[in-house]
Image (spheres, rainbow, N blue to C red):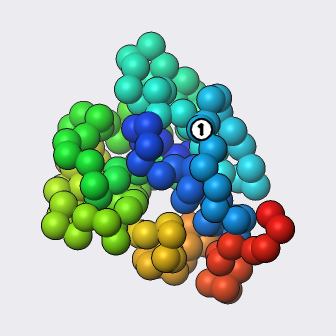
Amino acid sequence: MRSILLIGSVGVGKTTLRQRLHGHKLRYAKTQALETEHGVVDTPGEFLESRIYKSALINASYAVDLVVLVQAADVRGTRFPPGFASAFNREVIGVVTKCGLAKGRRDDAVWHLRLAGASKVFCVDSLTGDGLEELIAELHRDDGTAQDLAATKPRAGR
């Protein structure tokens, strides 16, 4: 899997997505600092929401292959300004999370991510696993590896 940097506001599901990608049991955890696990860098939402920390996001992007902008389908508006992706010298894609909760706002979230500069946008539901197969295929696109979708299901005891 290509290494990725997850960027999004507080509560959009970055940590849950990371847990799902690694096949961990889903549990709530507030990210307080940059956390790296098996090529996935999870960032606190405050890093996007405060101009002071945006340079930390840019610096963190130098260590990954792909930047992933995360927008929840159940949130009105966005914290991603138009053209936000131009700050990174990496490919930038978008992921709309919580797609099972707010199907009516999914199109708005996709539009916000496209406006921010995401080259591709994937819609996922980390709780049910819907849409994860396509996202995982994209994350493995350039490194030649393959992964069984069953490996993304939560495992007992983790």
Q: Position of residue 48 (x, y in %)?
A: 41, 30
Q: Position of residue 31 (x, y in %)?
A: 61, 36
Q: Nearer the viewer, residue 59 or 99?
A: 99
For the N terminus, which image quadrant? bottom right
Residue 83: quarter of image:
top left
Name the residue located 44 percent from the left edge and 79 percent from the top edge.
Answer: 130
Residue 93: quarter of image:
bottom left
Which element is circle 1 on?
loop
Name the residue located 41 percent from the left edge and 69 percent from the top edge.
Answer: 124
Q: Is residue 101 above or below residue 148?
A: above
Q: Residues within 10 Å of mark 1 (few under 14, many from 20)?
A: few
Q: Is residue 115 left or right of residue 40?
A: left
Name the residue located 56 percent from the left edge and 56 percent from the top edge.
Answer: 16
Residue 140: quarter of image:
bottom right
Name the residue located 17 percent from the left edge and 56 percent from the top edge.
Answer: 108
Question: Label 1, on which residue?
Answer: 30
Q: Position of residue 122 (x, y in %)?
A: 37, 68
Q: Given the image, on which type of amino acid does mark 1 rest?
A: Lys
Q: Is residue 151 left or right of residue 53?
A: right
Q: Nearer the viewer, residue 135 or 61?
A: 135
Q: Is residue 84 left or right of residue 153?
A: left
For the C terminus, which image quadrant? bottom right
